[in-house]
Image (spheres, grey):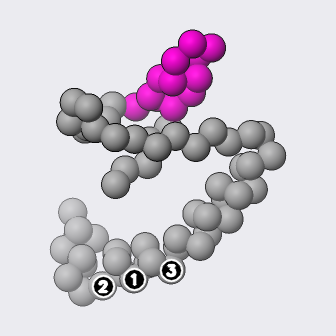
């Protein structure tokens, strides 16, 4: 699963960054209103403990020295 940023150009949804997707890959689009930024920030904060557990471990320490 990937999280990709994009925008609606008035006709179609355009990705703001390259994506490694196979042809006909299924995607879900969640359109955020300006007020939804707090929701996005909250979700990011909720994810922090999981990312810390994944990245802050001895097996990942080799990347710290690159």
Label 2 Cα neighbours within 10 Å, binned few <14 / some 14-19 / many ≥20: few
Quarter-wise, where is residue 51 in the image? Answer: bottom left
Q: Which residues are magenta?
A: 6-17
Q: Which residue reaches farthest top? A: 11
The answer to whether 54 is drawn above or below residue 32 in the figure is below
Label 3 Cα neighbours within 10 Å, binned few <14 / some 14-19 / many ≥20: few
The answer to whether 13 is drawn above or below residue 20 in the figure is above
Q: Position of residue 25 (x, y in %)?
A: 28, 38
Q: Which residue reaches farthest right? A: 35
Q: Position of residue 15 (x, y in %)?
A: 44, 28
Marks 1 and 3 close (CB-CB < 8 Å):
yes
Quarter-wise, where is residue 27 in the image? Answer: top left
Of 25 and 8, the residue lying toward us:
25
The answer to whether 63 is drawn above or below residue 6 in the figure is below
Earlier-in-chain disc, 2 versus 3: 3
Q: Which mark is residue 32?
A: none
How far apart marks 2 and 3 lie (CA) works out to 13 Å
Quarter-wise, where is residue 44 in the image? Answer: bottom right
Q: Which mark is residue 49?
A: 3
Name the front one of labels 2 and 3: 3
Q: Which residue is mark 2?
A: 57
Element carrying mark 2 = loop
Left or right: where 47 falls relative to 41: left
Q: Which residue is mark 1?
A: 53
Marks 1 and 2 close (CB-CB < 8 Å):
yes
Residue at (68% x, 65% y) in the render: 42
The answer to whether 45 is drawn above or below residue 6 in the figure is below
Residue at (51% x, 24% y) in the render: 13
Of 33 and 17, the residue lying toward us:
33
Left or right: where 48 falls relative to 57: right
Residue at (34% x, 75% y) in the render: 55
């Amino acid at each position: 699963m990937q999280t990709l940023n994009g925008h609606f150009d008035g006709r179609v949804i355009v990705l703001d960054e390259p994506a490694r997707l196979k042809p006909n890959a299924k995607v879900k689009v969640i359109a955020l209103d300006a007020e939804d930024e707090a929701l996005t920030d909250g979700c990011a904060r909720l994810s922090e403990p999981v990312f810390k557990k994944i990245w802050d471990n001895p097996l990942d320490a080799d990347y710290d020295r690159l």
